[in-house]
Image: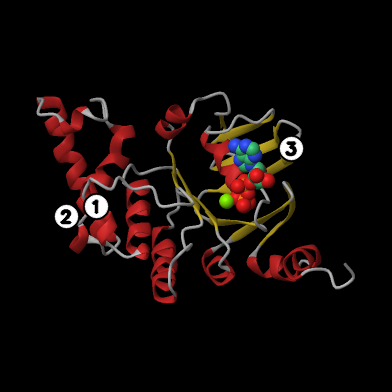
Amino acid sequence: MADALTAEGINLAFGGHRVLTDVSLDFRAGQITGLIGPNGAGKTSLFNCLTGLYQPQQGSIALCGRRIEALPPARRAREGLARSFQHVALCPDLTVAENVMFGRARLGKAGWFDAFLPLPRGRAEAAEARAAAEKVLARLGLSAFSEALPASLPPGTQRMVEIARAIVAEPRVLLLDEPAAGLNAAETRHLTEALRALAAPDLIMVVVEHDMDLIMQVCDRIHVLNFGRRIASGTPAEIRADPEVVRVYLGDPDD
Ligand SMILES: Nc1ncnc2c1ncn2[C@@H]1O[C@H](COP(=O)(O)OP(=O)(O)O)[C@@H](O)[C@H]1O
Ligand SMILES: [Mg+2]
């Protein structure tokens, strides 16, 4: 599929432990796709396969028709794959704006730390990266925090900063792993609105999340994993009515 991230026949195991079994699915541009499933279903592992952190034993991955499964993580990032992690991973010693600037690295020609050295090429790129970071922070309503250190901010704001860092390089694919984890109700509402506002015709957005309200509100389509297998795909309404999904989430009364 042209404007999509597709995985075909992904098999991943660690030793004898099968984590993903024959997983085939696609994530389309212009949509927000949810990836849901119980703990241990393989959602984060699938993200790791997509970004190149894990190398599946079998399967192919294509971004907009181009095979990427043989590319190392840094090359995939340059192809436009950006992600946030299940646990907030901001540099504690850098300000919010500096953290977001780091997300710009894939576009830089100067090495990514040259931007912090007083060399002409690094300086020009740093100025450009700073401007891009300030723009993204403004877009997410975070301008007031640009000079703050991450640890001084509430969890919801740290999450939003991570998302800012992921989108500052104008990725083609945005993979978000449990963005609402640890957020209170108000923060989750803010995040829900921010995610909807980020959707764009050429952006492939994927959200792993346990918060079903958030998933049902932001997603155009949903894939469901259970024990490393895809068990359902469809619109939020279809997924809500799917008997197997209901059984997995609510438990089988006969068990
Ligand atoms: N690096 C690894 N080594 C061994 N087992 C792993 C590794 N990464 C994930 N797993 C296993 O894969 C399964 C799925 O984990 P994960 O992808 O984190 O699930 P989810 O994100 O859906 O909760 C779990 O049983 C987990 O222990
Ligand atoms: Mg996970």
Residue 145 lies in quadrant? bottom left
Residue at the right extreme, as displayed: 254
Badge 3 amino acid: His
For disc 3, does the CB lie below 8 Å from ligand 1? Answer: yes
Identify the residue at horizontal 14%, vertical 29% (top origin).
117
Q: Which of disc 2 and disc 1 is earlier in sequence? A: 1
Identify the residue position indicated by label 3 in the image. 17
Q: Position of residue 214 (x, y in %)?
A: 52, 68
Q: Which of disc 3 and disc 2 is earlier in sequence? A: 3
Q: Is residue 146 left or right of residue 180?
A: left
For label 2, the crowd category at 10 Å Cα-Cα, with few meaning under 14, some 14 to 19 and many 20 or more, is few
Identify the residue at horizontal 87%, vertical 67% (top origin).
255
Badge 1 amino acid: Val
Q: From mark 3 to mark 1, how far is it between C-alphas? A: 39 Å
Is 42 rendered above or below residue 235? above
SS state under label 2:
loop
SS state under label 1:
helix
Comparing 8 with 117, the one in front is 117
Identify the residue position indicated by label 2 in the image. 147
Identify the residue position indicated by label 1 in the image. 96
Q: Position of residue 25 (x, y in %)?
A: 67, 45
